[in-house]
Image (spheres, grey):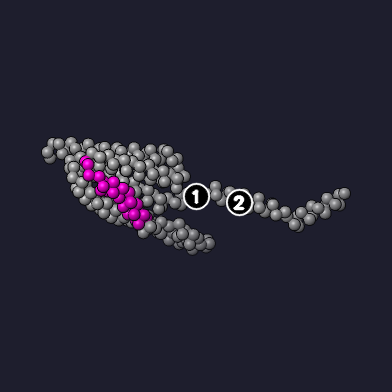
Amino acid sequence: MAANQTSLNIDDARFPLPGHDFEQQATSDIVETKDFDYSKRSQWLRAAVLGANDGLVSIGSLMMGVGAVKQDVKAMILTGCAGLVAGASSMAIGEFVSVQSQLDIELAQIKRNKQRRDSEEVPEEEEGEKANLPSPTQASAASAIAFALGASVPVLAASFIGQYKLRLGVVVGAVTLALMAFGWLGAVLGKAPTVKSSLRVLIGGWFAMAITFGLTKLIGSTGL
């Protein structure tokens, strides 16, 4: 009997059951999923989300400010279009300069690390370090495109409404929905709390539009 058990154990060791490999593979996949670093998305995600929010809030606020003193739909649309082009260009240039400065710093650090490894005869890891470097072009393009997409929401919303008060309400409503959508999208992609992120973005956008509308209305009423 003991001999039979020994024989079975030896056979199990020589020929492992397929189920064991499957369980190990499943466990490995779960660990890899849990260990996924969502911060790797931060480079383009930050630029895209900030660009879209900037476009929505700044152009929406700008159009509300113009609408506070002028009821002409053409003036609002021209102001929105000019702000869209200027804002997208500014975001692209600013993001490129910022990320390029970060890239220069990290490249200099990689060079110093390489010199240290050469002097200490440590195995090189330069290619792995360079693979994680930020891309100024990618961040710049993401900011410009996202800003333009966000800014187009209030511009398109105001383009088809002739009545003054209704136009202002439609602009506020469109910006509100878009802010909630972008806040939710950014939270989902970054694995952050969706409700909290959406509300934070929404309240900030409302605050900016209210201040711009109120101050412009006040300045316009004084005749300055």
Q: At 55% from the left edge and 49% from the top edge, which residue is drawn?
A: 33
Residue 12 coordinates in the image, percent (x, y): 76, 54
Q: Nearer the viewer, residue 103 or 124?
A: 103
Q: Nearer the viewer, residue 158 or 207?
A: 158
Toward the left, the furthest residue is: 223
Q: Residues within 10 Å of mark 2 (few under 14, many from 20)?
A: few
Q: How crowded is mark 1: few (under 14 residues within 10 Å), some or many (20 or more)?
A: few
- Disc 2 is placed on an element classified as helix
Residue 193 coordinates in the image, percent (x, y): 45, 40
Q: At 38% from the left edge and 38% from the top edge, which residue is drawn?
A: 199
Q: Disc 2 residue type? A: Ser
The C terminus appears in which quarter of the rendering? top left
Residue carrying label 2: 28
Q: Is residue 153 magenta?
A: yes
Can the viewer see residue 129?
yes
Q: At 32% from the left edge and 49% from the top edge, which residue is drawn?
A: 150
Residue 32 coordinates in the image, percent (x, y): 56, 51
Q: Distance between the residues labelled 1 and 2?
A: 16 Å
* Image-quadrant location for residue 138: bottom left
Left or right placement of residue 49 versus residue 168 in this view: right
- Disc 1 is placed on an element classified as loop
Residue 188 coordinates in the image, percent (x, y): 45, 45
Point out the tag, 1 or 2, that comes first from the N-terminus.
Answer: 2
For residue 103, above or below residue 77: below
Q: Residue 172 carries which label?
A: none
* Image-quadrant location for residue 110: bottom left
Q: What stretch is highlighted in magenta?
A: 139-164
Left or right placement of residue 107 versus residue 79 in this view: right
Residue carrying label 1: 37
Q: Does the magenta stretch include residue 160?
A: yes
Kindly report the secondary structure that dominates the magenta region of the rendered protein. helix
